Image (tube, rainbow, N blue to C red):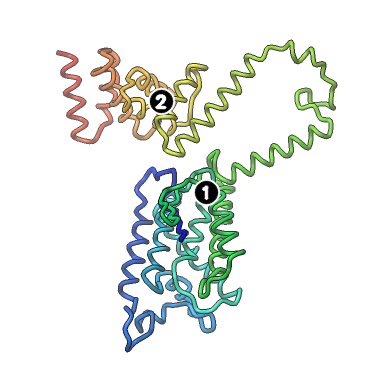
């Protein structure tokens, strides 16, 4: 006996994915209302009122292109679908926002149904087409994350990690829906239509700038690959990228005599920045903070993106590395002073200087700046109490 399935990913959403949880709840609610629990007198899977909501390609109604996705054939059917929606939907929900995610989910259900009908499929029900669209979106947005799989092989029970790119692209799409099309009553074409919709939609949104891109999504990976390909092509054709002319024969002694320190430092800085971004994507905050400290030791002027720097400063503060955290918060305030919640950063920095670093002047400076903008009564009281204690 060999069983395996995904249980979580290596990244967590920044915000609570309310829309994804709501979709899961609605699917379960409709299942319990619509499922005709087995009995000898009535073998139908669905209750009579729900049978009109299933998609029947021979005589489809417009609403069935959405309603079919909220019906399920049995308990295992909905449990499997909702597990995959939970695992892959949370981060896609975080990326698209609640309203955008719900619209995307319903569109994914519709387009997977259209593909199923056009390719000659039979009657269909289940959320797997919409979930395939969500999973395709995850593939584009987070291809370098890890999927944690639970597996049970006879007496062995454990978990393993596999890249999202390989698991979704090769196992879920190619193997499960192209090669191993053996299981009866499975809407393989609806799955493939959903995957296609999710992948193409995310590429289009990233390409048009409708959602923010990162260095680790599939769009950026393809752009980097294309730049490397173009570079190899022009260099192999005799172009000298440093002189802007045709190829020049380089003397080996000239190369060996050039100092390599600056280049090595530059390469290490670039590597550290990439590693910091990757660790933050994985939510490995401690390692990201450690690599940030190594980065600023090489070059104190290095400036990570706004959210990265704030996450690192918060992590350093949580690790009681007060001086390093204060330096990171100072850099944040200097370069990202228009941040909408800058008073929270000023409050945190003022408390660090007051309680741990014993720098009275700086503590007063940042606490007074925070007090002018704070709106939370508890934070205002805390800020005033700290200022009063410092001035006494």
Name the residue rendered at 25%, 13% in the picture: 360
Question: Can you say which quadrant of the picture contains the C terminus?
Answer: top left
Eyeballing the image, is 188 above or below 316? below
| In this picture, residue 150 sits left or right of residue 112 | left
Circle 2 — which element?
helix
Query: x%, y% of residue 186?
Result: 51, 71
Residue on which disc 1 sits: 164
The residues tagged by marks 2 and 1 sit, at their Cα atoms, a distance apart of 33 Å
Instruction: Name which of mark 2 and mark 1 comes first in the sequence.
Output: 1
**For residue 174, what is the image quadrant?**
bottom right
Given this view, does label 2 or label 1 mark the residue nearer the observer? Answer: 1
Q: Residue furthest left?
A: 392
Name the residue rendered at 54%, 58% in the picture: 172
Eyeballing the image, is 356 above or below 68? above
Query: x%, y% of residue 248?
Result: 84, 22
* Residue 22's disc number: none
**For residue 190, what is the image quadrant?**
bottom right
Eyeballing the image, is 271 above or below 53? above
* Residue 332's disc number: 2
Q: Residue furthest front?
A: 155
Q: Nearer the viewer, residue 254 or 44?
A: 44
* CA neighbours of label 1 inside 10 A, class few (<14), some (14 to 19), many (20+): many
* Number of dots carrying numbers: 2
Circle 1 — which element?
helix
């Amino acid at each position: 006996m060999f069983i395996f399935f995904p249980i979580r990913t290596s990244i967590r959403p920044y915000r609570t994915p309310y829309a994804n949880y709501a979709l899961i709840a609605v699917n379960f609610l409709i299942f319990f209302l619509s499922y005709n629990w087995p009995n000898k007198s009535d073998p139908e899977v669905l209750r009579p009122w729900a049978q009109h909501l299933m998609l029947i390609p021979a005589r489809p109604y417009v609403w069935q292109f959405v309603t079919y996705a909220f019906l399920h054939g049995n308990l295992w059917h909905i449990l499997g679908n909702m597990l995959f929606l939970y695992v892959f939907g949370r981060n896609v929900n975080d990326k698209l926002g609640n309203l955008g995610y719900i619209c995307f989910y319903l569109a994914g259900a519709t387009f997977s149904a259209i593909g199923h009908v056009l390719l000659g499929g039979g009657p269909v029900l289940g959320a797997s087409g919409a979930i395939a669209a969500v999973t395709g979106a995850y593939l584009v947005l987070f291809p370098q994350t890890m999927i944690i799989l639970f597996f049970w092989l006879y007496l062995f029970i454990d978990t393993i990690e596999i890249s999202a790119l390989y698991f979704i692209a090769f196992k879920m799409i190619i193997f499960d829906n192209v090669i191993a099309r053996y299981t009866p009553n499975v809407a393989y074409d609806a799955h493939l239509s959903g995957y296609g919709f999710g992948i193409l939609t995310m590429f289009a949104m990233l390409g048009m700038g409708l959602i923010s891109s990162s260095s680790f999504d599939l769009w950026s990976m393809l752009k980097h690959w294309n730049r490397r390909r173009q570079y190899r092509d022009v260099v192999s054709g005799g172009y000298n990228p440093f002189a802007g002319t045709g190829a020049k024969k380089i003397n080996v002694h000239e190369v060996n005599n050039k100092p390599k320190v600056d280049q090595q430092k530059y390469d290490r800085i670039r590597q550290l920045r990439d590693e910091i971004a990757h660790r933050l994507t994985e939510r490995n905050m401690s390692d990201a903070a450690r690599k940030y400290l190594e980065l600023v030791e090489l070059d104190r002027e290095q400036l990570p993106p706004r959210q990265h720097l704030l996450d690192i400063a918060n992590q350093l503060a949580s690790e009681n590395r007060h001086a390093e955290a204060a330096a990171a918060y100072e850099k944040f305030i200097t370069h990202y002073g228009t941040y909408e919640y800058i008073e929270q950063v000023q409050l945190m920095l003022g408390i660090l200087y007051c309680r741990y670093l014993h720098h009275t002047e700086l503590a007063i400076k940042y606490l007074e700046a925070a007090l002018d903008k704070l709106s939370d009564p508890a934070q205002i009281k805390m800020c005033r109490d700290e200022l009063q204690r410092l001035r006494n």
